[in-house]
Amino acid sequence: MGQKQFIESSRDQGGIVFRPGLEGVPVTHSAICDIDGIQGKLSYRGYSIEELASQSTFLETTYLLIWGELPNPQQLRDFEEEVQRHRRVSFRVRDMMKCFPATGHPMDALQSSAASLGLFYSRRAIDDPQYIYDAVVRLIAKIPTMVAAFQLIRKGQDPIQPRDDLAYSANFLYMLTEREPDPLAARILDKCLILHAEHSLNASTFSARVTASTLTDPYAVVASAVGTLAGPLHGGANEDVLAMLEEIGKPQNAANFLQKAITSKTKVMGFGHREYRVKDPRASILQGLAEELFARFGKDEMYEVAKAVEDESLLNLASKGIYPNVDFYSGLVYRKLGIPRDLFTPVFAISRVAGWLAHWREQLGANRIFRPTQIYTGFSGRSWAPPEDRSMKESN
Ligand code: SDX
């Protein structure tokens, strides 16, 4: 029989609609994050992103995402102390990272080192709340240390140990830059981590849930999600936005650049979203954080280019529901914080570990292994022939 024709969106015999990329298809119930893509609203466990970014801390928000309630003072103190106590990473992991090529992408280094944690914590007691708590603490605590460690190692230096007197975000910037950060810089990074912590069933969180549904360990769950986040259509876009702004160069070039992109159907990095049909609320908050940093530490000239791109996009992308997303302004904030460009996505990962672990825990609470089906479009009924009898046509 010949090869069946590829089918776009369609109804199969069961009456179930085939939706490429599962667009609009609910695959789980979840109480973690709600997105209103039409109104441009985002909330974690019922609290608006605006209020959490303004009032909370990343560790407090992490606790909320994973256990569903804001921690009381004792719970918050215990969680902060436990995370602080577990920031260090075994010399075996650090020595392993010294074997990575210095030219490797930090997201590959992070995926490898996150997965390696499973070798050290091999016990799998995923029905034990204490095991879940300990795994959350270890991953939230150690991921920033591993991101910072690779940065120093690839420069030919030994990584530096965490400083127990510094809070979470300040300590990450210290381990990364070897200098104690300005309090404003640490506070703004902490808000960025809140903004990137969770976003319902985005691609990397879906990866996390699929991996979690096989009942493997949380380190494999996070490693699976890191690999997914690395892609340029997902978490990797923040790196590409800066390159795009530098290519545009000046605000007056924005209109021409956008026109060319639209004509050539090239995706404009940092724009568009599967859920939002208006500006991503996180982009608006990040823009405010960028302006706060510029007021204190000097402006980034690419900011005027970014604003020109956004203004021009209102003329020709907005009509298609394409607006700036979370990645459009985040790179300008991270660059002003002294974070190297190829670490923008690892910083996204540091934050999104909170969301991935919240979904890991929720999946375990009502698990059914993910195993969707397909519409087969291949050959059938073919017979094997010896090599000498096969035609020379190229295989596709
Ligand atoms: C993140 O899902 C999440 O929640 C992700 C995230 C999170 O917090 O986890 O928000 C983080 O990943 C943000 C997105 C970062 N990626 C980018 O900025 C890369 C550029 N954006 C696009 O690749 C795209 O917008 C996606 C991937 C984000 C969404 O793509 P969809 O929903 O699959 O939309 P599509 O590719 O089917 O496009 C629909 C139409 C097409 O036009 P037509 O063929 O119908 O004429 O919109 C156009 C697309 O060409 N379009 C764009 C565009 N994005 C979509 N046109 C120009 N520039 C863009 N960026």
Image: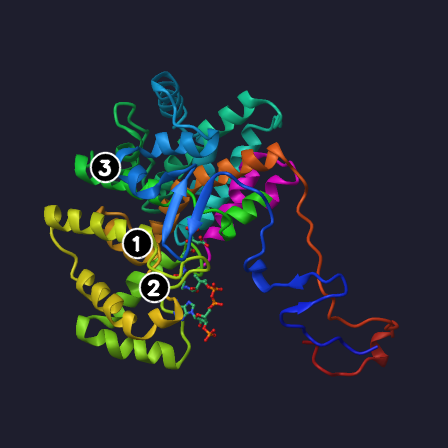
In the figure, 28 relative to 77: above or below?
below
- Left or right, 53 with respect to 377, comes to left
In the figure, 313 relative to 171: above or below?
below
Q: Position of residue 160 (x, y in %)?
A: 31, 32
Question: How far apart are the two marked residues, 2 and 3, measured between alpha carbons?
Answer: 27 Å
Mark 2 = which residue? 323
Q: Main secondary structure of the magenta part?
A: helix
Q: Which residues are magenta?
A: 210-231
Instruction: Find residue 283 and name its label.
Output: 1
- Amino acid residing under circle 3: Arg
Question: How far apart are the two marked residues, 1 and 2, measured between alpha carbons?
Answer: 10 Å
Mark 2 or 3, nearer chain start: 3
Residue 99 shows in the view: no
Indicate whether residue 214 is drawn in magenta.
yes
Mark 3 = which residue? 187
Residue 83 shows in the view: yes
Tell me what residue is drawn at x 16 percent, y 61 percent. 301
Mark 1 or 2, nearer chain start: 1
Q: Quadrant of residue 165?
A: top left
In the figure, 5 relative to 203: above or below?
below
Indicate whether residue 221 is drawn in magenta.
yes
Q: Position of residue 104 (x, y in %)?
A: 42, 53
Q: Secondary structure at mark 1?
A: helix
How many numbered discs, if any?
3
Tell me what residue is drawn at x 55 percent, y 40 percent. 221
Q: Position of residue 192 (x, y in %)?
A: 30, 44
Residue neighbourhood size for the residue with mark 1, other residues' Cα within 10 Å, grouped as few (<14), some (14–19), many (≥20): many
- Amino acid residing under circle 2: Tyr
Tag 1 near tag 2, CB within 8 Å:
yes
Mark 1 or 3, nearer chain start: 3
